[in-house]
Image (spheres, coloured by chain):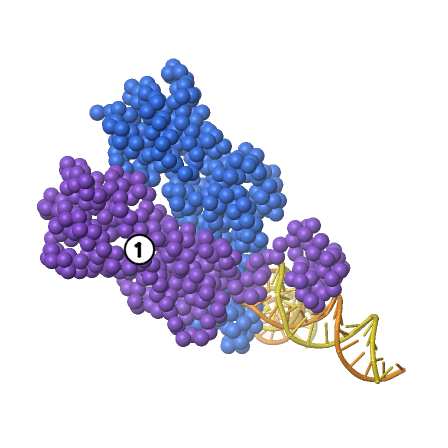
Chain colours: A purple, B blue, C orange, D yellow
Amino acid sequence: MTLKDIARELDVSISTVSKALNDSVEIGQDTKDKIKAFAKLYNYRPNNIAISLKNKRTKNIGVIIPDILHYFFTTVFRGIEQYVNERGYNVIVCVSDESFDKEVINMEMLANGLIDGFIMSLSAETQQKNDFTHLKEVADQGIPVVLFDRVTDDFACDKVIINDFEIAYEAVEKFIQNGRKRIALVTTESYFNVSRKRSEGYQKAIINNGLGFDDQLVLRLPYANLNDLEISNFLDENVIDAILCVNELFAIQCMRLAQKKGLKIPSDIAVIGFTDGILSRYGHPTLTTVDQHGDRMGAVAARLLIDRIENDISDESENFQTEIIEATLIERESTVND
Amino acid sequence: MTLKDIARELDVSISTVSKALNDSVEIGQDTKDKIKAFAKLYNYRPNNIAISLKNKRTKNIGVIIPDILHYFFTTVFRGIEQYVNERGYNVIVCVSDESFDKEVINMEMLANGLIDGFIMSLSAETQQKNDFTHLKEVADQGIPVVLFDRVTDDFACDKVIINDFEIAYEAVEKFIQNGRKRIALVTTESYFNVSRKRSEGYQKAIINNGLGFDDQLVLRLPYANLNDLEISNFLDENVIDAILCVNELFAIQCMRLAQKKGLKIPSDIAVIGFTDGILSRYGHPTLTTVDQHGDRMGAVAARLLIDRIENDISDESENFQTEIIEATLIERESTVND
DNA sequence: TGGCGTTCCGCAAACGGTTTCGTGTTAATA
DNA sequence: TATTAACACGAAACCGTTTGCGGAACGCCA
């Protein structure tokens, strides 16, 4: 069922049909009625591809995330999806699998007309290499990009992040208020901007509270291929009464291994993680954690992007914004003193 | 950068440029070289929308899942994404949020030219209502559909499922081999085809092993809004030494509440769940569970769909297939007898 | 009756490609 | 020298829409 079909059946021109269906004033009321009735009867729907070609707008948003199995990204994705749907857009997702090459390939695939803009979080490899030419290329093509969470200062665009530094600081102070003295940090290698900021927040809080920063109490783990040994040794070699972990999985692992050694949580060791995921809520004990409000983050990123798309911002004044989502600490069993 | 631009610059016709870039034999070698060099220099990429319009193929697959936060669906999604990318397709995802209306709206949005086919798992509401007219409509439009996991006999198409009945049967026998006598089942209300089959497998195994089916030992919970009370009462009111749960979350909840009552796992109560997710692997204790091989399921569904799309199956002989993925039982701490 | 303004509709271009067919040039062959 | 085949390229249709513009028909007024 195309405009042409309707035009032929009703013996009018294609343009008349198009205008009638779009309620143009150029078309007489009875003609409109006739055409609309016919269209409804045969369940006519305009072909979106043709429309996209015509107005050079696809109403699709490209989303590129490093890992779909990661709870945080999943919630951000959901936030994006919900928001863009409300504004009549669809989402095309690609997963970079933390790989620079996949990120580049996916962007190139989507950039040739398939999408009106990108929302993305940088892959681990991209952050390591510090190579953002693929971002610059799509930007040069006039395609807007919004970065969230894993962002970089080396590429100018709208960004959405959380207050990593402050919330890490707050978490450490929570420990201190509860009387903890030997507070450890379990983080990733430092090329992640988020881990770095969280580490800085940790360090600052330690120092400001007069505990004295001790690099021995910082454990840096590879992002993937987690194994028990390093954590286990770390726990053996240090006297620790609290651990701040930069993600949920690290926290759960720490708790499990500490418990295995006969330590009680939270009485012997308190634990705080990042990402309020399933593990935090249903782990044993339940985990005090930083809620990054992924849904909100996704929605904000989507709002920034669509606004930029629709405002046809040819004022390339590049008034880029960085929105900061306030993370919140959710207290659960892993820090409650009994 | 369009064909027209290149043609103008190089003073040849558009068709010559098109043919040259597609390595047509009609074009002389030197002309080809010149055009290709120019195209590469200016980083020309054909507009996918225009191509889609021309050959009425978008190379997009529509995926509709009930819940992106559900680990199982996430793994299936990943399987789909990986497979279709290899075959040059992209994925457009929509989340139905277990709602019939959202499922319908999403399908209609995507059906008008945006995608070449659907991969989907039915929402809870759709299964309850048993209304599949939206599926039939897109099928009538000639758009192929592949259902996975949450399928229905009332709509003819390719399907991918796991052997729910058999694996539930196997799980119960595992309990029995370990000497368990009072084996409970925690399931959802029965409109989910998967839960129903798992329940049947449970029941059959109980009966075949001479344990005598006791409906008292079956707890039926609502799918959402889980609260502790029902499970807690269930544990109080019955003498139970093993529980089979139809999903991961139920299993984790059961373990937590059982432990709260002072019961030891697995010595007092053994537990088996479905879905080998994060909770199963990192829960306390680690959970014996049914691995549904979501990745494989997604890949198979994608293969079925793309084969059907590309084989231009006008032999509407409707030789629909139902592929069955063999689930496997992963043994962890929650069933090991000590 | 001539001129003017409305109303209603069709023509054709445009979006960016692919593809069929036709045409002009050259060289080989009878 | 005339015929023909091979080769290289261009014109135009097509995919399904939207939209500016022109024109026909009509009514109204002077």
Q: Quadrant of the C terminus of chain B?
A: top left
Q: How many labels does the image show?
A: 1
The residue lying furthest to the top in this view is B210
Which x, y percent locates residue A301? Answer: 40, 60
Chain of the residue where label 1 is placed in the rendered structure: A
Q: Mark 1 points at which residue?
A: A327
**Residue appearing at x 45%, y 67% in the figure:** A308
**Residue appearing at x 21%, y 57% in the figure:** A169
- Give left or right: position of B215 versus C6: left
Which x, y percent locates residue B114? Answer: 54, 54
Which x, y percent locates residue A5? Answer: 69, 56
Of residues B308 and A205, the one nearer the viewer is: A205
- Give left or right: position of B152 versus B237: right
Whether residue A29 is visible here, answered yes or no, is yes
Q: What residue type is labelled 1?
A: Ala
Q: Is residue B51 above or below residue B288?
A: below
**Residue appearing at x 14%, y 57% in the figure:** A209
Secondary structure beneath label 1: loop
Whether residue B295 is visible here, answered yes or no, is no
Q: Quarter of the image holding residue A335?
A: top left
**Residue appearing at x 24%, y 52% in the figure:** A246
Which x, y percent locates residue A64? Answer: 39, 56
